[in-house]
Image: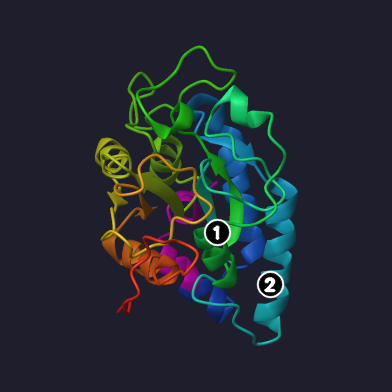
Amino acid sequence: MPDELAFLSLTEAVRRIRSGDLSPVKYTQALLDQIAAHDGQLDSFLRVLDDGALESAALAEIAVKNGETLGPLHGVPFALKDIVDVAGLPTTAQSQILAQQPPKTDDAAVTAKLHDAGGILLGKTATHEFAIGGPSFDLPWPPARNPWNLARYPGGSSSGSGAAVAAGLVPMAIGTDTGGSVRNPATACGIVGMKPTYGRVSRRGVFPLSFSLDHVGPMTRNIADNALMLNVIAGHDPGDPGSANLPAPD
């Protein structure tokens, strides 16, 4: 796939899709092709939702042709660290124990916000087992690799999200940060990762580690993209007792 699409910024993708210059179906398929070509080495994704992503992209394309806007992320794919719930899918936290659990019945708050903004879920990304500690080498899923050097670690525990964004597999991804798990992979992979102010982004539907330390944060390739993603996912959620009941300014 041409680098022009693989490394298209989130803000530019939004602009081009809205203008009709870029087909959401073409863009989504291009990213799926990128995953097929490169993720066999990176292992950044635990689950890729090819059919569902293309179906959502087709709906986004119809909306563009009808002059409709689905939201600030209209037609742009995103990925979720696999400790974030998606209705109809299991949340494994990269653990064989949780992999045997039934699929979730509801989206996490952040998943719902991204969907409501017009984003397209491309898949769920690798983490550490239970999103803590270091990479595990005795699980069915191999640990994610750093796209800059496959012999290196991409940081964690939002390892798959960091690697996927850096490699041009997806323009934006959700990570979580309890003790550096967004910031570490962002640093190791050369991208932008934000640990938002506590309570700014709801953690409802996210596998918990520490009530007073868990944060959900955006991971992108530049600051403007990160700000756009944060604007979408921020806001009060009465379903999260730690959510701040304060305005979330731009």
Residue 99, how many percent across, how many down? 64, 30
In depth, the one of 29 and 76 nearer the eye is: 76
Residue at the bottom extreme, as displayed: 67
Mark 1: few/some/many CA within 10 Å (<14, 14-19, 20+): many
Q: For mark 2, give the secondary structure.
A: helix
Q: To which quarter of the image does residue 74 belong?
A: bottom right
Q: Main secondary structure of the magenta part?
A: helix
Residue 54, position in %: x, y?
A: 71, 56
- Colouring mode (rainbow / by chain / secondary structure / one colour): rainbow
Residue 247 position (above or below residue 30): below
Residue found at the very far front of the displayed protein: 241
- Which region is colored magenta? 1-14
Camera-nearest label, 2 or 1? 1
For residue 244, which numbered disc appears in the image?
none
Residue 58 x %, y %: 73, 66
Where is the C terminus found, in terms of image quarters? bottom left
Q: Is residue 8 magenta?
A: yes
Q: Nearer the viewer, residue 239 or 103?
A: 239
Q: Secondary structure at mark 1?
A: helix
Amino acid type, mark 1: Thr
The quadrant in which residue 139 appears is top right
- Contact check, label 2 and label 1, Cβ < 8 Å: no
Amino acid under disc 2: Glu
According to the image, label 1 marks what residue?
111
List the residue tagged with mark 2: 61
Residue 16 falls within the magenta-colored stretch: no
On the picture, is 198 further left or further right than 98? Answer: left
Residue depicted at 43% across the width and 63% down the height: 10
Residue 112 rendering spot, x and y as whole percentages: 57, 64
Of mark 2 and mark 1, the one earlier in the sequence is: 2
Q: Is residue 138 left or right of residue 216?
A: right
> Up-down: is 178 above or below 59?
above
